[in-house]
């Protein structure tokens, strides 16, 4: 499935802020001292390791904000699988602008490709089951929309985008509210009819109580495959089931085979390794 790109208004401010942070108060001292003002060059964005590419629009903005005369030609679009040595894109234009924008362009491209690649690793591991891998709100500050886009590019789905688009009642909410029933009842009374309510449960007794209260989804926290399978049976299709906790590519399949609908994985966004991508000089 083709993933719609993010609108420019959601990309440009993040890239602009990153460039301003990098340029500081005096600009690119190294490049401006060494490279002639009229020099032009072509460079290539090249994969150094296998993965999934994501974030090309961010890279394009990084170069064009430095110098609008720079042109990036994409060879492999977001979502493409990479192998070492693959040409992702070429960048042509004023050499100073390309070198000045290089690090910010690569930071976004490598990070978002890392998120997409990590997501794809789990999506591939659970292929053939009905389960979907999804992200959480454990995102880097200021990069939530970008990281959640990368998860979609990698074959995953998105959990809530913020505190304002769904209710997720967790253990601390339950403890402070005085139990599952008052927490769910207060949530239902406090939000509109279009807002979904999800409840985190740690035990099957809590799950049974949640089913009696008619929640829309249940977060089955840190349950093993056997317990998850029993939980799915208790739910019986009356709510969305979501597994969470210690999910890695090597542990994902038994969890997915339990019959859960979703598998939420926080590390996809908060600590996925970057994908090694380089910018190589091709010609002057």
Image: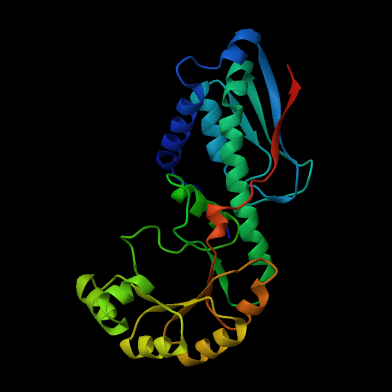
- Decide if residue 69 is on the left or right side of residue 86: left
Instruction: Note whether 146 is above or below 30 in the view shown.
Output: below
Instruction: Note whether 108 is above or below 283 in the view shown.
Output: below
Along the line of sight, the residue nearer the viewer: 17 or 172: 172
Judge whether residue 214 can be spotted in this image.
yes
Image location (x, y in percent) of residue 85: 79, 41
- Decide if residue 61 is on the left or right side of residue 95: left
Residue 13's quadrant in the figure? Answer: top left
Question: Residue at 75% across / 46% down in the picture?
Answer: 49
Question: Residue at 47% across / 53% down in the picture?
Answer: 139
Question: Residue at 32% across / 72% down in the picture?
Answer: 173
Image location (x, y in percent) of residue 281: 73, 24
Judge whether residue 169 can be spotted in this image.
no
In the image, farthest residue toward the left: 189
Residue 73's quadrant in the figure? Answer: top right
Instruction: Note whether 129 is above or below 268 in the view shown.
Output: below
Residue 245's quadrant in the figure? Answer: bottom right
Instruction: Note whether 197 is above or below 106 in the view shown.
Output: below
Quarter of the image with the N terminus is bottom right
Quarter of the image with the C terminus is top right
Question: Residue at 60% across / 30% down in the picture?
Answer: 103
Image location (x, y in percent) of residue 216: 37, 79
- Decide if residue 279 is on the left or right side of residue 54: right
Image location (x, y in percent) of residue 191: 23, 70
């Amino acid at each position: 499935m083709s993933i719609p790109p993010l609108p420019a208004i959601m990309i440009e401010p993040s890239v602009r802020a990153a460039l301003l942070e990098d340029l500081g108060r005096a600009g690119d001292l190294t490049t401006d001292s060494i490279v002639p003002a009229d020099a032009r060059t072509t460079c290539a964005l090249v994969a150094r390791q296998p993965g999934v590419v994501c974030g090309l629009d961010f890279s394009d903005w990084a170069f064009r904000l430095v110098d609008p005369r720079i042109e990036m030609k994409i060879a492999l679009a977001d979502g493409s699988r990479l192998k070492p040595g693959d040409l992702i894109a070429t960048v042509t234009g004023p050499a100073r602008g390309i070198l000045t924008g290089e690090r910010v362009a690569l930071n976004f491209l490598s990070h978002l490709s890392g998120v997409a690649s990590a997501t794809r690793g789990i999506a591939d591991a659970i292929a053939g089951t009905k389960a979907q891998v999804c992200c959480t709100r454990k995102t880097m500050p200021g990069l939530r929309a970008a990281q959640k886009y990368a998860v979609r590019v990698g074959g995953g789905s998105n959990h809530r985008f913020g505190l304002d688009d769904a209710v997720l009642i967790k253990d601390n909410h339950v403890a402070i509210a005085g139990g599952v029933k008052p927490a769910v009842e207060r949530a239902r009374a406090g939000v509109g009819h279009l807002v979904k309510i999800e409840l985190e449960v740690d035990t099957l007794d809590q799950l049974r109580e949640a089913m009696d209260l008619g929640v829309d989804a249940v977060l089955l926290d840190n349950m093993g495959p056997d317990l998850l399978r029993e939980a799915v049976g208790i739910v019986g299709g009356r709510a969305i089931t979501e597994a969470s906790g210690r999910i890695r590519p090597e542990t994902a399949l038994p969890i997915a085979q339990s019959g859960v609908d979703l598998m939420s994985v926080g590390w996809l966004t908060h600590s996925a390794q970057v994908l090694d991508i380089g910018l190589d000089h091709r010609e002057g």
